[in-house]
Image (tube, helix red, strand yellow):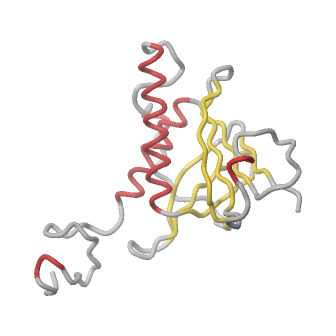
Amino acid sequence: MPRQVFLYDPPERFVAGTVGEPGQRTFFLQASASGRVTSVALEKTQVSVLAERVDELLDELVRRTGGETAVPAVTPSEMEDSGPLLPPILEEFRVGTMALAWDADDERLVVEAQAQVPDDDSPEDTLLGDDDDEEGPPLLRVRLTGGQARAFAKRALLVVAAGRPACPFCGLPMDPEGHICPRANGYRR
């Protein structure tokens, strides 16, 4: 089956967002440009780790260059995005493998999200490679400026944190009707 590559270089918008109520949310990465919208589903932990790694990579770039890079130290206020996901929210694929890279020539952060593949395939061989690979799982590739990457990471961390509140005793998420707390010997909190 021919590989489908969703390339956004650069995107007008690249965000993490959710659909559903806390505790039942589905997480998405969504890229859009020139009237095209691509949404891919992934797990909450994948969004969290991606945002953390983006921030770490950008912080390291700023540190190594002594601030002489096109990467801002914090998210520029004009790039902050708190809007909802753009319709239609149609899942192109569920993300299995992700990769990050810094393109020093163009000063762009490259984010790749590849569809899940069966265990016997080797997805690492197809990430951050050439688009010339005609075979392989679908791939979302987004090339972000430093400011866009900072804005993505900030929003993604806020989206992850916006879930159910944590129980003050055990730290597990609480539903609106409470939860059975292991630290309270099974009584509801």
Is 145 situated left or right of 114 in this image? left
Residue shown at 29% from the left, 78% from the top: 175
Residue shown at 69% from the left, 36% from the top: 10
Residue shown at 62% from the left, 23% from the top: 107
Where does the N terminus fall, quadrant-wise? Answer: bottom right
Residue extending farthest to the left is 184
Q: In which quarter of the image is residue 8?
A: top right
Residue 28's place in the image compared with 150, above or below, is below
Residue extending farthest to the front is 120
Is 38 situated left or right of 66 in this image? right
Residue 110's place in the image compared with 29, above or below, is above
Front-most of residues 118 and 18: 118
Residue shown at 70% from the left, 45% from the top: 127
Front-most of residues 129 and 71: 129
Location of residue 113 in the rendering, given as x and y in whole percent from the top left corner = 64, 51
Is 30 situated left or right of 152 in this image? right
Q: Quadrant of residue 111?
A: top right
Q: Count the marks: how many?
A: 0
Residue 60's place in the image compared with 14, above or below, is above
Location of residue 94 in the rendering, given as x and y in whole percent from the top left corner = 64, 65
Where does the C terminus fall, quadrant-wise? Answer: bottom left
Location of residue 161 in the rendering, given as x and y in whole percent from the top left corner = 35, 57
Location of residue 159 in the rendering, given as x and y in whole percent from the top left corner = 42, 56
